[in-house]
Amino acid sequence: MKPSLMGTLNLKFSLIPLTGFLQNPQNHKRQHPSFVTCGLRGGTRKPLWRSRVLSAEAIQAVHSLKLANSNSKLQHVFSNKLSRLLKADLLDTLAELQRQNEFHLALEVFEFVRKEVWYKPDLSLYCDMIQLLGKNRMTELAERVFTELDKEGLKPDTRAFTEMIGAYLIVGMIDKAMETYEMLKASGCCPDKLTFTILIRNLENAGREDLAAILKKDCTEYLEYPERFLEQVQQKHSKRQQLDLV
């Protein structure tokens, strides 16, 4: 039996105490996780229709959002600035907040985008949010965004599953990461180099050589030149361990 998508949780970002974050940014201390990342991602992937250079309006919107130190001021920015932005500028505002790791503001803008009349479900928007929430250890919210894909009529792709796997690994939820990996394969998607790199490195770091061995065996089925790939993963892993010892 194929694993099903994760539950039917509703996406309600109001669960986050935004007022506390905005009034006391020091309350949210960003931790440097022991989770092993990978350069294969190459940064946040953006659709072709997003601008490469921020407009003055988008820059001003980002600045105003970051200055809003209460919910009332934040709502004022949404009503008087974001509501007037062109589609491209609004999406660029969201992307810039994600780039700056302003996840609490990015969540609000993400929800705002989804209510716009021109909005059509976009898988890349969801993947970007899952990645952002995952690296900030907001695992439950990442799960809810992932679950929302099905409600939007979107089918998770390899990247969506991989971002969710990363979200679990960063908080040490190895069983959930492996469950999601099995869901990826059962869905008809194929794990890629990023999927295998993140899983193998983090499983080995956690001392789960048994699970890492399963992943290495799967590489022979899903990747071209698996021996070369595994050799590269091991070399990079060894270099990282040497740097940690210095």
Image (spheres, rainbow, N blue to C red):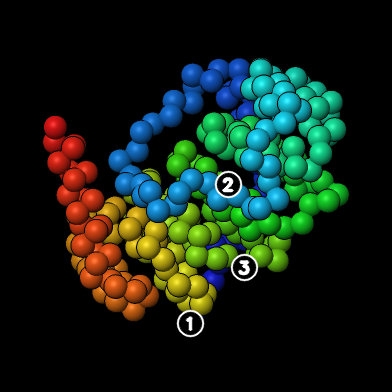
Q: Amino acid at mark 3?
A: Lys
Q: Which mark is residue 155?
A: 3
Image quadrant occupied by the C terminus: top left
- For residue 240, above or below residue 70: below
Q: Does residue 218 show up?
A: no
The residue indicated by pointer 1 is 1
Q: Nearer the viewer, mark 3 or mark 1?
A: 3
Q: Amino acid at mark 1?
A: Met
Asked if disc 2 and disc 1 are in contact, CB closer than 8 Å, the reply is no
Frontmost residue, 5 versus 244: 244
Distance Cα–Cα, label 2 vs label 1: 29 Å
Q: Nearer the viewer, mark 2 or mark 1?
A: 2
Sequence order check: which comes first, mark 3 or mark 2?
2
Q: Does residue 131 show up?
A: yes
Q: Position of residue 45 (x, y in %)?
A: 55, 50
Q: Secondary structure beneath disc 1? A: loop
Quadrant location of residue 6?
bottom right
Q: Position of residue 212 (x, y in %)?
A: 25, 64
State left or right for residue 14 relative to residue 244: right
Q: Position of residue 120 (x, y in %)?
A: 77, 56
Frontmost residue, 140 versus 167: 167
- For residue 6, above or below residue 187: above
Quadrant location of residue 52?
top right
Q: Residue at x 76, y 21 (%)?
A: 72
- For residue 211, above or below residue 201: below
Q: Amino acid at mark 2?
A: Met
Sequence order check: which comes first, mark 2 or mark 1?
1
State left or right for residue 16 relative to residue 192: right
Q: Residue at x 47, y 38 (%)?
A: 136
Mark 2 neighbour density, 10 Å: few (under 14) some (14–19) many (20 or more): many
The residue indicated by pointer 2 is 129
Q: Secondary structure beneath disc 3? A: loop
